[in-house]
Image: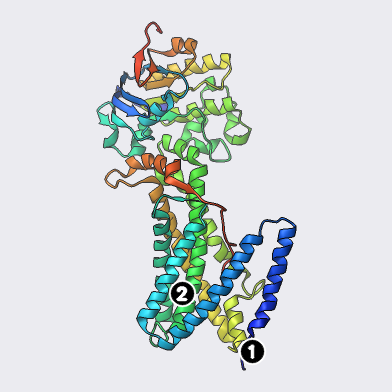
């Protein structure tokens, strides 16, 4: 597994300053490297749009930076190579699973995902939504991101698988020092994974205490 | 060989057949009656008028009249390209991109064919220039509207895929690659198919016309080959331009930070206000027009 992440990672935190998108305004928060910040809120409150703004897919105000790189200082695709978002519904555009994975990552499928090695030649259409979701997580991690934006990453998984995937994600996040913004609604999950937890309330965020 | 002129009342016979078809469509509720009748009526009126215009144009042969005629043809074709797109860009872009691509490709190729290949004296002699330009425009119009329609439709339908590819750090060119390829393919298909079938399945209209008018088939064939080749070239380059300008427009408008806004712009132009929806996908059959 070490070959996936060569060298010593530089500690980079994800910083949102006065970000406004949709109904949200003046959102400021820090996601330290290797930590998970959970975002919750009722549906339609703008959680996903906030993630999209951080991934630079949505027009927004305010300033977003990763370490000492501001979002607007680099071309968008370079920003998104470092700040990778995993949407709630992952998309697959080739017929088979394999071509979606860059280089050698196809062969290094982590055991926690519980896929046989031949998954890479499976056709995408036979994957279940839970399988797609797990593979999408690995596809994003294979980009070696410095920050991860997860939009309900376990929504399609059953209880047991959810915890296995959580453990695996947390281990990767800690080991690779990835700053992670994690949208979740399940209180138990937030309790398990979050280093900090914010809830969207009206047009801003409020800190939820006692979740860790 | 003397050309047999057609009496107007004989054309009426053909028109009666169209009426019969329209009646059939009406009775069987096929929903084509209205479009069929309007299109047939347009054909008759437009061609009758163009006959008068051409008579006058051939008699005067002044450059500015020919240029004016070419301009009108171009603008009408540009309007047609817009009308044939199911989803189109907001505002003048739909018209501008299609018309611009048609102008560059068909005028360049027509002028080249006139000056270098055919070489009438002067090069803009209307008997050569106008029919040639008409064929070029008719076909580039078909190719470009197909390509743009497919491009916009693909961009719209596959928004989620494009976005997911962008999320994984791909550039907009990579994320849009499949759609651009598909758009090019559908823009070029009519020309390629027509070339493949020419002479075996179909006798192209221009050659048939020349033979009917008394040209030796060998000469008619040479003209037809020339026309088909330059039409394909014009359509191809036109589609290349339209697809690259169109996809550029879908993604980006702020130059200093190209990668930056393309996303924002992809959002903006893919969301409802940026796009408008118009009736049927195609208003006219997408047959190549080798008239």
Which label is found at residue B133?
A: 2
Residue located 61% across and 90% down the image: B3
Q: Considering only vertical position in the picture, is B230 above or below A166?
A: below
Residue B131 in picture, x, y percent from top left: 49, 78
Residue B184 in sight: no
Residue A15 in picture, x, y percent from top left: 29, 23
Marks 2 and 1: in contact by CB < 8 Å?
A: no
Return the chain for callout 1.
B
Quadrant of res B39: bottom right
Residue located 53% across and 57% down the image: B185
Same subunit under labels 1 and 2?
yes
Q: Secondary structure at mark 1?
A: loop
Sequence-wise, the earlier of marks 1 and 2 is 1
Q: Judge from the rendering whether residue B32 lies leftward or rightward of residue A147; answer left or right.
A: right
**Quarter of the image that includes the C terminus of chain B:** bottom right
Residue located 50% across and 29% down the image: A136
Q: Secondary structure at mark 2?
A: helix
Q: Residues within 10 Å of mark 1 (few under 14, many from 20)?
A: few
Disc nearest the viewer among 1 and 2: 1
Which label is found at residue B4?
A: 1
**Quarter of the image that includes the N terminus of chain B:** bottom right
Residue B147 in picture, x, y percent from top left: 50, 56
Q: CA distance from mark 1 to mark 2?
A: 26 Å
A180, A34: nearer the viewer:
A180
């Amino acid at each position: 597994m070490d070959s996936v992440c060569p060298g010593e990672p530089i500690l980079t935190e994800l910083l949102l300053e006065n970000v406004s998108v949709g109904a949200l305004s003046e959102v400021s928060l820090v996601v330290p490297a290797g930590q998970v910040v959970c975002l919750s809120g009722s549906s339609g409150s703008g959680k996903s749009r906030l993630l999209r703004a951080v991934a630079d897919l949505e027009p927004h105000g305010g300033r977003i930076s990763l370490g000492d790189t501001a979002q607007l200082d680099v071309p968008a695709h370079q920003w998104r190579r470092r700040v990778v978002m995993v949407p709630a519904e992952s998309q697959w555009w080739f017929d088979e699973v394999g071509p979606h994975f860059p280089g050698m990552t196809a062969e290094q499928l982590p055991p926690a995902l519980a896929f046989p090695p031949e998954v890479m030649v499976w056709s995408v259409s036979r994957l279940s939504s839970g399988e797609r979701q797990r593979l999408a997580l690995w596809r994003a991690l294979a980009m070696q991101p410095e920050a991860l934006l997860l939009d309900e990453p376990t929504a399609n998984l059953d209880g047991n698988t959810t915890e296995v995937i959580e453990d695996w994600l947390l281990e990767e996040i800690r080991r690779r020092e990835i700053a992670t913004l994690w949208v979740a609604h399940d209180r138990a999950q937030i309790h398990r994974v979050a280093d900090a937890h914010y809830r969207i309330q009206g047009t801003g965020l409020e800190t939820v205490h006692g979740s860790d | 060989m003397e050309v047999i002129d057609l009496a107007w009342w004989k054309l009426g016979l053909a028109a009666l057949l169209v009426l019969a078809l329209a009646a059939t469509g009406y009775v069987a509720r096929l929903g084509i009656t209205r479009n069929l009748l309007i299109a047939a009526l347009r054909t008759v009126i437009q061609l009758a008028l163009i006959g008068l215009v051409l008579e006058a144009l051939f008699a005067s042969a002044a450059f500015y009249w020919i240029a004016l005629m070419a301009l009108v043809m171009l603008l009408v074709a540009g309007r047609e390209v817009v009308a044939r797109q199911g989803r189109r860009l907001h505002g003048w872009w739909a018209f501008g991109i299609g018309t611009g691509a048609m102008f560059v490709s068909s005028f360049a190729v027509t002028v080249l064919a006139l000056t270098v290949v055919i070489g009438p004296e002067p090069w803009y002699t209307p008997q050569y220039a106008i029919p040639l330009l008409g064929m070029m425009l008719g076909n580039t119009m078909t190719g470009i509207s197909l390509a743009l329609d497919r491009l916009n439709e693909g961009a719209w339908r596959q928004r989620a895929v494009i976005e997911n590819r962008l999320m994984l750090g791909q550039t907009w060119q990579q994320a849009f690659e499949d759609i651009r390829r598909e758009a090019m393919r559908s823009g070029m298909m009519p020309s390629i198919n027509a070339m493949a079938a020419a002479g075996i399945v179909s006798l192209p209209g221009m050659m048939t016309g020349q033979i009917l008018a008394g040209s030796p088939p060998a000469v008619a064939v040479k003209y037809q080959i020339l026309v088909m080749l330059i039409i394909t070239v014009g359509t191809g380059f036109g589609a290349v331009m339209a697809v690259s300008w169109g996809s550029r427009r879908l993604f980006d408008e702020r130059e200093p930070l190209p990668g930056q806004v393309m996303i924002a712009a992809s959002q903006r132009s893919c969301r409802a206000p940026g796009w408008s929806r118009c009736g049927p996908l195609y208003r006219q059959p997408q047959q190549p027009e080798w008239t």
